[in-house]
Amino acid sequence: MGSIVDELEAVLGPSQLDVSEVSLRRYAVDQAPVIDFQLPVAVVFPETVAEVQAVVKACADSGVAIVPRGAGTGVSGGAHATRNCIVLSLERMDRILALNPDDETAVVEPGVVNAALNEAAAEHGLMYAPDPASFRSSTIGGNVATNAGGLRCAKYGVTRDSVLALDVVLADGSLIHTGHQTFKGVAGYDLTGLFVGSEGTLGIVVGITVRLKYLPREVHTVAAFYPDFRTAAAGVLAVGKARVQPAIMELLDGGTLTQLDDIHGSDLSARGRSLLLVQTDGFGAAAEADVVRHVLREGGATVTTEASAEAERLVELRRHSRGTEVDDEYRVGEDVAVPRSRLVDYVAALEAVGAAQQVHLKVVAHAGDGNLHPTFWIDRQGPAIDAGAMDRLQAALDESITAALAMGGTITGEHGVGQYKLRWLGQEQPEQVRQLQRRIKDLFDPEGILNPGKAI
Amino acid sequence: MGSIVDELEAVLGPSQLDVSEVSLRRYAVDQAPVIDFQLPVAVVFPETVAEVQAVVKACADSGVAIVPRGAGTGVSGGAHATRNCIVLSLERMDRILALNPDDETAVVEPGVVNAALNEAAAEHGLMYAPDPASFRSSTIGGNVATNAGGLRCAKYGVTRDSVLALDVVLADGSLIHTGHQTFKGVAGYDLTGLFVGSEGTLGIVVGITVRLKYLPREVHTVAAFYPDFRTAAAGVLAVGKARVQPAIMELLDGGTLTQLDDIHGSDLSARGRSLLLVQTDGFGAAAEADVVRHVLREGGATVTTEASAEAERLVELRRHSRGTEVDDEYRVGEDVAVPRSRLVDYVAALEAVGAAQQVHLKVVAHAGDGNLHPTFWIDRQGPAIDAGAMDRLQAALDESITAALAMGGTITGEHGVGQYKLRWLGQEQPEQVRQLQRRIKDLFDPEGILNPGKAI
């Protein structure tokens, strides 16, 4: 038997197999902190389902691991290369195979970029609802792998809620179709839901049927500045108490405002130490925005009174706030979620952790669904690493996770466990539940070649 | 080893174990047609999780099957007794354990009736969205078992979309907790989704954490009468094209209108041969209803112009149209779903099937999500069964299923496969996909004691 590279050469064209050092390095990691850097043996770029099947069969025969990859924008290390693996990039499978305006569905290959699907859908007054911050570059396949969330999930749901059916290449190279082309369907077990969020550990998603939602004709945006973060978090609960469901409810703390000012030359931090951005949409958007403004003012906010142009600009700033920074060993972004009633408590806990460990903290939150992205970081001090500071950073991360779990929260609201968050999974899920998942993994992938060491 | 009844007597109080003939008969079936009548050995009524665990352990030790049961309102035979089984009724576990208005969640025991949860939630301006026609009597546990739908799913989602976490007793009597208390959460595989809709074949759900939605303050209802069913179905697509998302969009054919007239003394069938009921809700309800009225009139409907009181009464009639009839060997209701663009074609196909097989047909549809409930029936003609008519009824059922699948549909949109629809499952799912599900079943229930012969 030849090497895996020989095997792959036999089933792929020359432009579909890359073993150059520069490519291996580029495809070795996603945007998460790296804890065990490994170079893949090769990177492959299949262009058809049959090619994916051939690659999987070759790897199965050779016992080589496969790390599937979309755009590599994940922040949990789900696409980090592992020992003796190939990276299977799905970026060239980027066709929208069908867009059915009357069915309000689309069928896409996994490499279709989220924004590209939204552009195509918009021509028909439709949208693909899940909108992770990476939507301009991340792929639907990657979104499916992590069950990605985004800004408008509280109203429109997460990726799982928009996926109707999947085509999946299993660990033996066979192809199955799960789910249904209809909005509703309950025949048999929910295999579709099992694959969504499984980070490529159960199969490789090569086709996705999604439900589209209606592109709202009207959108109103409210920007509310607060003197401190906790009062702003209380504003989130007040909007909920008014029983208004915004499409977007983003909470930014003082550290985030300062950073935005630094990048964009804005004066946000002079206007408040925290900002709550609320966007309502649909036929009731104006009436809902009125209620939101009233409720937030009552809670001590300074609310934009003018038309929402400035507020909309702020939402765009927030949307694009990622990409300016990539996590590394000095800076780690988290993705906890807590029950909404604990938002204020959790924000207080985060501030206490940051202060006690003397590490920097900034927080943005998809506050409508209690999903917070705190980032803890320490200063880089030249080539010498300050071991004490690194220890304090890790302690802050651990403590913030423990605090979230103590409040009934989760270690990951939308980014996935990947490789980086495995250390905390045992705190959230008892051994019996983890064991069940390992047995499901063994059932789908008995040889353990699909993205080993991830997700569970 | 004693009999299973002795074993159960040891772990339950005397009022929790019933072996009387009348009870065995009553709990032997749900509301589906019966194809293999079996009496259970006993009916048990556990009141605590520990009692459910004890019952499961006793049955596991004795190799006796367990048929879990909520209110017995299912229409696919998921709760039909099977050979050498006990029926485990969860009706006494009917406490709302927590209702958290700020978190917008509730934690309930499985026997809580859907309407009871909604009443409790309404006090806080909240609702539990899934609303099967049986909502006044069906339980949340039963709704979870079948991944129940209802009238307002197109806007608010099905049961799966409202379930955040589950407590499940496994086949060995152990108890696990799946999911998260937060709106979002992607840690590990989606075990919660795997249990939802699995009809008690993977475990017995003993606790459910649900997300609540906001009770709309404003509701507008439009009733649109049409000269025929196909034009009414086209109206559904027209509302979609206008990119308005109603909470409810119910389509009733002439047969259904006649039946409602017979029961309620109304004059619906004199006003049209088909009725489309559209309900919009929320802050934009009035504006949305205006668009709906306009679009439907353009499509040839006679639309209620007055305030929506009459239309609302019609929605209530539609909601309560079940319960007046139970399926049996002469009358079988189906639950197909098709992609929305095929609604008109499928309605035509149904009419052709009914005419060709000379069987009666009436159809109601949750048209917003392409989910149709055709009922085919033949006349009862005294004690002698007309074998030819029975054959034609079965042929009509088979042909209607085949037609739905040919249009990209599913054999069950919201009722579940249960026992009755197993004969069609192989037409929808190829052997490899069914095999995967059987292996998952084996993993969770190696001895096959949990609701055998159902769902997959």
Image (cartoon, coloured by chain):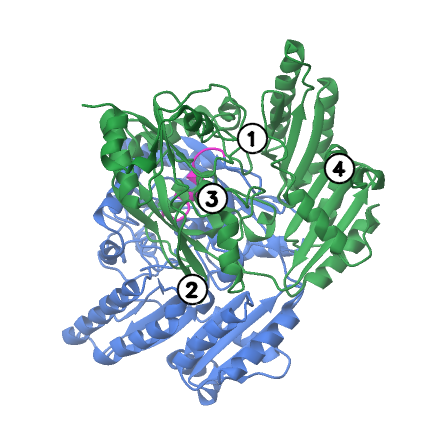
Chain colours: A green, B blue
The residue identified by callout 4 is A257
Label 2 to label 3, Cα distance in Å?
22 Å
Magenta: main secondary structure: loop
Residue that carries the numbered disc 1 in the rendered image: A411
Disc nearer the start of the sequence (4/1): 4
| Residue positioned most to the bottom | B270
Please identify, in this view, whether the residue under mark 4 or under mark 1 is nearer the observer: 4
Hey, which quadrant is residue A52 in on the image?
A: top left
Give the foreground label among 3 and 1.
3
Q: Residues within 10 Å of mark 3 (few under 14, many from 20)?
A: many
Chain ID for label 4? Answer: A
Which SS class for mark 1?
loop
Query: Which of the two labelled residues, at mark 2 and mark 3, occupies the earlier sequence position?
Result: 2
Amino acid type at mark 1:
Ile
Give the residue displayed 28% in from the left and 31% down from the top. B61
The disc label shown at residue A103, or none: 2
Which tag, 3 or 1, sits closer to the chain's start? 3
Q: Are marks 2 and 4 in contact (CB under 8 Å)?
A: no
Residue at the (37%, 39%) spot, across then down: B203
Q: Secondary structure at mark 3?
A: loop
The amino acid sitting under disc 2 is Asp
